[in-house]
Amino acid sequence: MTKATTTEFLARAGTPKHVDEAKLALAYIAADRSLGEARISLISHISAVEVDGKFVPSFDDEVGDCIPALSASEKAASAVKKDVERYLSLLEDAQSISQLTESLGRIRINVRNAEFDSKSRLEREVRSRKGDAAECMTLPIVVDSFAHSEKVAKENQQSIDDLLSRIASAKKILGKY
């Protein structure tokens, strides 16, 4: 899987699976359309004037009225484009924030399963030996099981932290729209 381009993002954002991205995509499209209209307005104020037998472009007197709109449209389009690019960089290889959330959930389930397995191992040993938990906690099989659980948790903590940070940043961007 590769990082999505802006075009791919815009194409899929309207599908039900990616509704959380639709407002960002619509803002991008609206800003792009507004910029296009502002440019067309600017162009409509250009005419050709003959100078020394050659035609050169010339702006009419009302061109100044469309400059602020063009400038505002350029700023807005640039801001939304940066948000889309930042959003896509946060997704990395994922196709949506939903996939990031699913990945986070799978990692958390793996960690919880490892913790559950170690607790289950302890309970089985307590039942089979008819001993107490403190006594069974020193058994090599139980110690190994808890060590494995801790190892899984440590190995996945960086991924969990990274995904939580990326999801929060992505939601912040989506929240603007």
Image: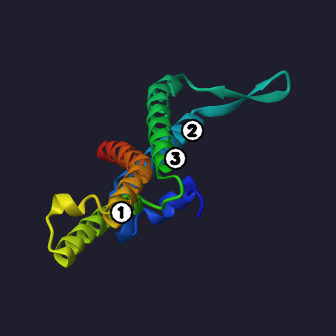
Amino acid at dot 2? Ser
Most distant residue in the right direction: 53
How would you rate the neighbour count of disc 3 (Cα within 10 Å): few for under 14, some for 14-19, many for 20 or more?
some
**Which quadrant is home to the N terminus?**
bottom right
Are the residues tagged 2 and 1 within 8 Å (C-beta)? Answer: no
Look at 36% across and 63% down and name the residue there.
Answer: 140
Q: Which mark is residue 82?
A: none
Look at 29% across and 45% down and name the residue there.
Answer: 175
- Of marks 2 and 1, which one's residue comes earlier in the chain? 2
Amino acid at dot 3? Ser
Alpha-carbon span between mark 1 and mark 3? 45 Å
- Of marks 1 and 3, which one's residue comes earlier in the chain? 3
Residue that badge 2 annotates: 44
How would you rate the neighbour count of disc 2 (Cα within 10 Å): few for under 14, some for 14-19, many for 20 or more?
few
- Residue in the foreground of this view, choosing between 19 and 97: 97
Q: How is the image coloured?
A: rainbow
* Residue 19 appears anywhere in the view: no
Question: Where does the image place residue 17, in percent across and percent down from the top left?
Answer: 37, 69
Q: Which mark is residue 140?
A: 1
Question: Where does the image place residue 53, in percent across and percent down from the top left?
Answer: 85, 26
Look at 44% across and 30% down and name the residue there.
Answer: 72
- Residue in the foreground of this view, choosing between 92 and 82: 92
Question: Where does the image place residue 113, in percent across and percent down from the top left?
Answer: 31, 67
Residue that badge 3 annotates: 89
- Residue in the foreground of this view, choosing between 164 and 118: 118
